[in-house]
Image: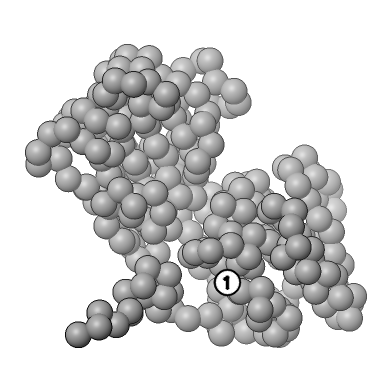
């Protein structure tokens, strides 16, 4: 596949973003590639009536920017390349310092596309800001939110009761999300090609309740025992009252992440980002 159009999504407005945008504009003009920007899903609806151009989405920013762009384009199934202007950049394919060289490589066809699993989140609560169905690339979090007392969340896997989690809540993460909130909460790393989800308790107040890895074909249900909030890829979508629940399954849509051939492998990235390779000084 060779791309003939760039759809550009920008994160925060700062000098780094401005410089990267200018580099992309020059690259597009020099190579006869159409370039347009978008900032919300409404900007993409016009694509439905257009010809089938080979488009690539570029996200300028950090992992949060990539997530927002990936969420917006999920129903369009467009390939997305992250250009890291942030700190960690687990989801980035290129760093800004290698931007022009990297884009030249990608537009020569030197890349692969990884199909990243998304979560489907269904909520049985009518008082939500949007539709009852959401998808997430990283995670769905059910937590106590602004409430000062413990949250109680009951977990069911394929209709079988597993346990009740008293604490701050529960994270359900994809392999992609295993390097994000779940990891910082003690969850395991899962390589992106592993067909599994991880369920990680947040500050649970009961010994023995440890993270669980389950098949991506599982139906995960989280039932609220107390008032809790629901976050999908960091966005709060609503609250649950006791006995209300959220069901989480594998989404029928995925995120198509462009990985340049020049990018290092998964564990090279993990070592660099998490400082696993640092000399201990002994």
Q: Which residue is mark 1?
A: 93
- Give the image's coloring scheme: one colour
Residue 7 position (above or below residue 153) = below
Question: Residue 61, position in %: x, y?
Answer: 64, 60
Can you say which quadrant of the picture contains the C terminus? bottom left
Question: Residue 226, position in %: x, y?
Answer: 30, 17
Q: Looking at this rendering, what residue extends furthest in the front direction?
A: 281
Foreground of the two, 250 or 85: 85
Q: Quadrant of residue 45?
A: top right
Residue 109 shows in the view: no
Residue 241 position (above or below residue 10) = above
Measuring 39% from the left and 59% from the top, which residue is drawn there?
179
Measuring 30% from the left and 48% from the top, which residue is drawn there?
185
Measuring 17% from the left and 45% from the top, which residue is drawn there?
210
Q: Quadrant of residue 104?
A: bottom right
- 178 horizontally vs 64: left or right: left
- 94 horizontally vs 25: left or right: left
Can you say which quadrant of the picture contains the N terminus? bottom right
Residue 169 shows in the view: yes
Q: How many marks?
A: 1
Measuring 69% from the left and 52% from the top, which residue is drawn there?
12
Disc 1 crowd rating (10 Å Cα; few below 14, some 14-19, many 20+) is: many
Question: Residue 3, position in %: x, y?
Answer: 75, 72
- 81 horizontally vs 232: left or right: right
Question: Residue 30, position in %: x, y?
Answer: 89, 81
């Amino acid at each position: 596949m060779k791309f003939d159009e760039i759809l550009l999504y920008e994160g925060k407005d700062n000098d780094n973003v401005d410089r990267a945008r200018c580099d992309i504009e020059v690259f597009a003009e020099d190579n006869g590639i159409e370039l347009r920007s978008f900032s919300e899903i409404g900007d993409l609806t016009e694509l439905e009536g257009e010809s089938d151009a080979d488009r690539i989405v570029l996200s300028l920013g950090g992992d949060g920017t990539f997530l927002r762009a990936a969420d917006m384009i999920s129903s369009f199934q467009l390939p997305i390349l992250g250009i890291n202007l942030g700190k960690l950049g687990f989801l980035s394919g290129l760093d800004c310092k290698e931007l022009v060289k990297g884009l030249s490589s990608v537009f020569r066809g030197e890349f692969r596309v990884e199909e990243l699993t998304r979560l489907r989140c269904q909520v049985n609560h009518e008082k939500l800001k949007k539709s009852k169905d959401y998808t997430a690339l990283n995670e769905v979090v059910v937590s106590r939110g602004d409430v000062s007392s413990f949250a109680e969340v009951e977990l069911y896997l394929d209709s079988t009761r597993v346990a009740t989690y008293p604490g701050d809540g529960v994270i359900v993460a994809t392999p992609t999300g295993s390097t994000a909130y779940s990891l910082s909460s003690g969850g395991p790393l899962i390589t992106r090609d592993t067909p599994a989800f991880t369920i990680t308790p947040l500050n649970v107040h009961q010994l023995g309740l440890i993270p669980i890895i389950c098949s991506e074909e599982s139906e995960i249900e989280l039932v609220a025992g107390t008032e809790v909030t629901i976050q999908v890829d960091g966005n709060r979508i609503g609250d649950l009252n006791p006995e209300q629940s959220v069901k989480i399954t594998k989404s029928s849509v995925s995120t198509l992440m462009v990985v340049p051939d020049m990018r290092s492998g998964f564990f090279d990235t993990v070592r660099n980002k998490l400082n696993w390779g640092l000399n201990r000084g002994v």
